[in-house]
Image (cartoon, rainbow, N blue to C red):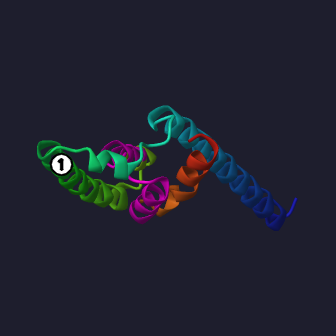
Amino acid sequence: MSSSDQSSIHTTSQTDAMSTKSTSTMATTKSLLRSILPSKKPRDPKATKDSETPAQKSERRLREAEAVRLLRGMASSIVQYQTSSAQLLCVYLIIRYFHTLSTEKLIILVSAVIPSLSCIVIHYFVVYA
């Protein structure tokens, strides 16, 4: 076997291994998202906001401000480490703190923070929500 044949075999097996790892990571990510994301659609944000008392409104605004602060920190971690667990935690925080947003706004928010996960989140909302 010539060295070019061996090189070709090595490149093919490396590509196959990377493809398998990518598929495995995607399946794990989908599984984790299903377990942490809510199984029902969020409540109607307009009805929720209309029935809020001033105290509830200020509490909601504080939660949203804290969530934005946390998301900024998580976004910098994601850029720095590129770990799937940091990405999933960030998606969880978005869903947890912004559950009153519409599905479309949640997808836009996730896409802005973690572009690589936006198609998984869109798939989740289309299929499971």
Q: Quadrant of the N terminus?
A: bottom right
Using the image as rendered, state which of residue 34 and residue 84 is in the foreground. 34
Q: In which quarter of the image is residue 42?
A: top left
Q: Where is residue 65 in the image (x, y as percent from the top left)?
A: 19, 55
**Residue 28 belongs to the span the image colors magenta:** no
Q: Quadrant of the C terminus?
A: top right
Tell me the element at label 1.
Answer: helix
Q: Position of residue 82 (x, y in %)?
A: 41, 55
Using the image as rendered, state which of residue 18 and residue 76 is in the foreground. 76
Q: Is the magenta region chiefly helix, strand or loop?
A: helix
Q: Left or right? Give the position of 105 relative to 13.
A: left
Using the image as rendered, state which of residue 92 and residue 87 is in the foreground. 92
**Residue 110 belongs to the span the image colors magenta:** yes
Q: Is residue 90 visible?
A: no
Q: Position of residue 85 (x, y in %)?
A: 41, 43
Which span is picked out in magenta? Answer: 88-113
How packed mark 1 is, by other alpha carbons closer than 10 Å (few <14, some 14-19, many 20 or more), is some
Q: Which residue: 46% across, 36% down?
A: 38
Q: Where is residue 5 in the image (x, y as percent from the top left)?
A: 84, 63
Q: Is residue 33 visible?
A: yes
- Amino acid bearing label 1: Lys
Q: Which residue: 45% across, 35% down?
A: 36
Residue at image mark 1: 57
Q: Which residue: 66% across, 47% down?
A: 23
Using the image as rendered, state which of residue 63 and residue 82 is in the foreground. 63
